[in-house]
Image: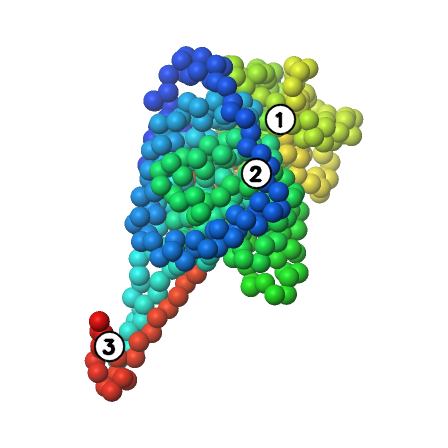
Amino acid sequence: AIPLPVEVFEPARKNSFGIDLEDSVDLASLEEDVRAYQMPDAPADATAEDVTRMVDQAHAASLAWADTPVEVRAELLERMADKMQERMIPLIGLCVHEAKKTYQDAIDEVREAIDFCRYYARRARIDFEEIPLPGPTGETNVMRLGGRGVFACVAPWNFPLAIFTGQMTAALVAGNTVVAKPAPQTPRIAQAAVDIAHEVGVPKDVLHIAPGGAEPGAALTGDRRVAGIAFTGSTATAKRIQRTVAEDDDRPIVPLIAETGGLNAMFVDSTALPEQAVMDIIASAFFSAGQRCSALRLLLIQEDVYDRTMRMLTGAMDTMNVGDPADPATDIGPVIDAASQEKLCGHIDHMRQRIVHQIKVPDFDTFVPPTVIRLDEIEDLEREWFGPVLHVTTWKQGKLEETVRRVNALGYGLTMGLHSRIADAAEEVAEEARVGNLYVNRTMTGAIVGSQPFGGERMSGTGPKAGGPHYLPRFAVERVVTVDTTSAGGNASLLSID
Ligand code: UN1
């Protein structure tokens, strides 16, 4: 059975093996440093020709890089982690200024990037050990993992350091050369990560950065020599990449590792601890301005406790601090850009008859008011709205299983949450839910590298899970070498010829 805590607890913010950055950051001086931080100029966008040149070089470097001992590659990742820790303040400054992250989110972001470096270094040493395989007498079999060649890594703006670094380091340590394309909104953060990699010794022809939007994106994923693609972003873009790859008949079959959107639901039943549930709803739906693919989109409250839960939730929402991310008291900052703001505000406006609660926001920058929208049916939520907009509806006692199935039927399978003190309910949801990450009695966001490998299924992605034990092998090829020791004239082993 899934063990259930019966008391309100503080969610763990510390990592099992990373560094606890909160302990090493003095928040008072951090604020000064971050406010004074001047962003460097953004790197220029790469053209299609630039990308072709990068792939030329990465392709030429791929054999030598694949032959580097895995230990050398793993050590480079560890050096990157150390360097990121050293550069923590400017990296946090970049996350606050370029990605509009709050301090807490910026600190978490840098920590996660460091964790990815250390975790994949550790995993690579395990995963890339030669595996002896059993076989008939007179035969030896070994399996080895090797690099695929040139990997394209296409990262989103919402985790511009962590996900960008995670994809890039996984591909590199698995023996691939890399051309990495950051989101057009966050090129400076990505450039900082690539600079660090180069500084610690990752060769320049092995790792390239192609900033920009659709032009470098299409040139990169459409290049025949790209042998693997890691992508985090929308489901629609993941499908476009699959089409691009499939359309070229002369291209090898290319694996896509995609982590995409979600219509993530949280169930609250009548036994849930109300304060804890409300705290976790707020954090899951509104923190990071709802800009996590793991964020709560659809709150499902058991009918009997709907009024009470909503009263508490709206009361708690009124205490949220929405404002300048460079102010440490801010809980929720603006969304990433005007285009995103416009889409979200359009949706809110369209649903204005159904708004249950809304928080006022400053009228500068790209704020979107945190909003709760009442739906009649689960099925009324048709798509992912990537911001601080929470949809809510009810379910009836005895219908938990059926309701989970209806959520599954929406087609996505990323995260799900449950607040309940009934162990059977947790088991029931765990059995029925078709999601990659199920969270019971805690927030639905903030997966920790190594502890909660993250990623979804169906419309939410292909797997494997980032920060998990099966991630690296998908960036590699498996090769088996079989030697018949009874042939070659009956010699027990092959001859060494110098
Ligand atoms: C994403 O939002 O693109 O658990 C994925 C979390 C994060 C999610 C990252 N690791 O909230």
Q: Earlier in the sequence, mark 1 or mark 3?
A: 1
Give the structural element (helix, strand or loop) at label 3. loop
Distance between mark 2 and mark 1 Cα atoms = 21 Å
Q: Earlier in the sequence, mark 2 or mark 1?
A: 2
Q: Quadrant of the C terminus?
A: bottom left
In the rendered view, how is the structure colored? rainbow
The image quadrant of residue 118 is top left
Check contact, mark 2 vs mark 1: CB within 8 A.
no
Name of the residue lying farthest toward the bottom: 489
Comparing labels 1 and 3, the label whose residue is closer to the camera:
3
On the rendered structure, is 148 left or right of 213? left
The image quadrant of residue 79 is top left
Q: Residue at x 35, y 65 (%)?
A: 143
| Residue corresponding to mark 1 | 335
Distance between mark 1 and mark 3 Cα atoms = 64 Å
Mark 2 Cα shell of 10 Å, populated few (<14), some (14-19), many (≥20): many
Q: Please provide percent x and percent y for residue 237.
A: 64, 46
| Residue corresponding to mark 2 | 211
Up-down: is 144 above or below 206?
below
| Residue corresponding to mark 3 | 494
Residues 332 and 256: in front is 256
